Amino acid sequence: MPESPAHRRFTRVNLPVWIIVGTTVIWGVIQKLTGRLVLEWAQLGLLTAMAVVSATARTWVGLKDPRVMYRMTLPLVAFDLALITLAVRFTGGFESQVWLLYFALLVSESAVMSTRGLMLTLALTALGYGWASAPLPMEHWNDFAYRVVSLSLVCWLIHQVYRSHAEYRTELAELREQYELAQERERIAREFHDGLGHHLVSAIRGLESLQRSLRRDSIQKHEDAVQELIDILRTALDETRQTIQQLRAPETSDMREFISRTAQRVARRLGAQLHCECPEAMPELTPLQSLMFTRVIQEALSNVMKHAGNPQNLWVECRVQDGWLEARIADDGNGFDPETVVEGLGLHSMRDRIQALGGELSIQSAPGEGTTVLARVPILQGESWNS
């Protein structure tokens, strides 16, 4: 199973956390052995255990589901604040330079916390640092207040900068989505021109030629030609209906119902037994994701109608697994040899759409053994697929 973008981002952050914890523990042990650390072995052991527990908890939650880790930010930060507060108290209170760890922790977390969570965290930091520094002489109160206020303002600034950046990324994603939708409409127009347009032009020219011939000859002589032209027009009509149905697919429609209706229509035309399975609750997708994904399914079903012959069974299955939305379209029709078939416009556009969503497309087939198309796109909630 390919690693998701969320897991890759988590790994990039989690590795430095373990390096920092390991380096700090080794430094503390060396300092204690050389007599330069004013800590009892029991205190050093407690701090080490808490640091390992904190890093382990973050790793376990992040590997299980990186999205859960963001919802667990406040409890994890509260635990780390308790760890730093004990370290400050054990190493001299207000005189200890370990208080800078407050700065390192909150600066790193202020970008991902909510505004309410950040305010609560800053209040807990002030209370914890005050307890670790107690009793605090009067001459140090100004310095203490300066440290707390400076830390709070820096974290607030970072929080605001990150929020502005996130809003900018959202606006950029919306613009990109509008651009992709425009590209999709252009692609549809090209398919009209290359497919439907070609059929209609051929039919019109043929009818014009037939009309000229009928002026000289009998109608019976041209029955075969008329039937051929009727077939061409019927193909054009089918393509027109299919394309119109694709264009009418509303962006906010029930995707499960839409896929089911499309599959039933194809199975009915083929005279095949339909096996359709989709989750009761389909995942929420952006308008572009929904459009592109349903277009891939429609293109796969269109290929079944064109190339599968007379399949007995048609399978259309959707499922959500490990942050991916998967669609499987299979038939037991004619099949083909992927090594000898050159991809046409349909397969090429399917790959383009899936790749535009950061997904994967695979096609398995063999002569006489049917064809299976598997499309997968990431659907991690709370994250933009454009990122």
Image (spheres, helix red, strand yellow):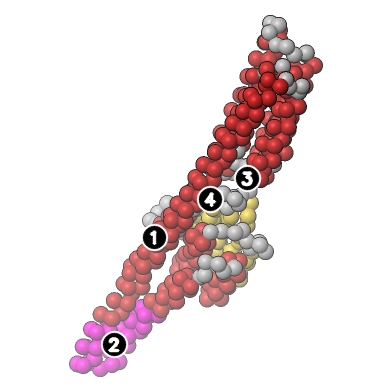
User: Residue 222 shows which numbered tag?
Assistant: 2
Pointer 4 local density, CA inside 10 Å: few below 14, some 14–19, many at least 20: few
Q: Nearer the viewer, mark 2 or mark 3?
A: 3
Q: Which residue is mark 1?
A: 183
Residue 384 circle label? 4
Alpha carbon separation for disc pair 4 and 2: 60 Å
Q: Quadrant of the N terminus?
A: top right
Residue found 43% across the figure and 54% down from its top: 176
Q: What type is the residue that disc 2 sits on?
A: His
Q: Residue at x 71, y 27 (%)?
A: 129
Which of the marked residues, 4 or 3, is nearer the chain's N terminus? 3
The answer to which of marks 2 and 3 sits earlier in the sequence is: 3
- Residue 263 seen: no
- Image height check: is 199 above or below 350? below
Q: Nearer the viewer, residue 65 or 221?
A: 65
Residue contact at pointers 4 and 1, CB within 8 angstroms: no
